[in-house]
Image (cartoon, rainbow, N blue to C red):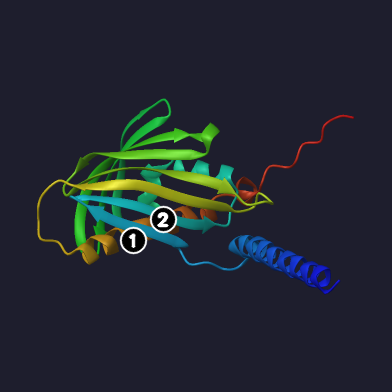
Amino acid sequence: MKKYLWGALAVGALGLVVFGVQYYRVRSAALQWEKPVADILSEKLEKDAGTMTIEFTSRIDAPVEAVLRAFTEPERTQEFSDTVRYSKLLRSEGNQKVVEFEMVVLGQPQRLAIEFTFVPDEQRVALKTVESQFSDLSGEYRLSPSPDGTKTLLTYTGTAKDKVKVPVPLAFQKSALRETFVSTIRALKKGLAARPRVENMPAPATQSNQ
């Protein structure tokens, strides 16, 4: 009888542990959307043989559709960014744009041209450099909605390949990438704040006819 009792207690305790883990995960996921967050939620920067692998995440308190609309106007970045001196549209064709930027990163001026490809059906924006002084960038931003549709989790993944061999400390390169990502996020937030409030509201849920 005692064996059965201890077995039942063990199963019950295991059930509580599993429930606790599941509750923690659900609660952690909820806090990701509820609590105030920094410009960078998470990051992963690894370099091997001259190529940096990059992953950043951030949260923007606006619906995915509004964030995508802000992304489609990269030529306006100079209006909202503290690090971009100017941004000029060089070419626009279909779902692609090429924009030239001049920016200051960690006190150093840089000039580059980036090709953006907008894929709204997949909620992502791909990019790659077509002109760059120091490195070739390639990556994409993926946008994921919060459960209530009012916020967006933005994930950037990509690579940066060195074009010239210069003795630049790895820590400096990582700091430059962080500053560039943060500058992008802050510019998006300022751009969204400058838009009419109705544009930043989630689309109303549609009701099917019974």
Front one among 161 and 127: 161
Crowd rating for badge 1 (residues with CA inside 10 Å; few <14, some 14–19, many 20+): some
Q: Alpha-carbon distance for marks 2 and 1?
A: 8 Å
User: Residue 73, which numbered label?
Assistant: none
Q: Quadrant of the C terminus?
A: top right
Which mark is nearer the camera, 2 or 1? 2
For image coordinates 37% across by 56% down, the residue present is 181
- Comparing 3 with 113, the one in front is 3
Q: Residues within 10 Å of mark 2 (few under 14, many from 20)?
A: many
Asked whether disc 2 touches disc 1, contact meaning CB atoms under 8 Å apart, the reply is: yes
Position in image of residue 98 (x %, y %): 31, 35
Give the residue at mark 2: 56
Q: Quadrant of residue 93?
A: top left
For residue 158, side relative to residue 106 (left or right):
right
Indicate whether 23 appears above or below 194: below
**144 sits left or right of 133 in the view:** right
Work out which quarter of the rendered image holds the N terminus and state it: bottom right
| Residue at disc 2, secondary structure | strand
Give amino acid for label 1: Arg
Indicate the amino acid at tag 2: Phe
- Residue under the image location 31 percent in, 55 percent down: 84
Quarter of the figure with residue 39: bottom left
Residue 118's place in the image compared with 189, above or below, is above
Horizontally, residue 38 falls left or right of residue 181, namely: right
Q: Position of residue 114 (x, y in %)?
A: 29, 40
Instruction: Compare residues 163 and 46 and report the one nearer the observer.
Output: 46
Residue lying at 41% horizontally and 55% vertically, measured from the top left: 56
User: Can you identify the residue that label 1 sits on?
Assistant: 178
Q: Farthest residue toward the right? A: 210
Q: Position of residue 183 (x, y in %)?
A: 37, 58
Q: Earlier in the sequence, mark 2 or mark 1?
A: 2
Q: What is the x, y in percent for residue 208?
A: 82, 32
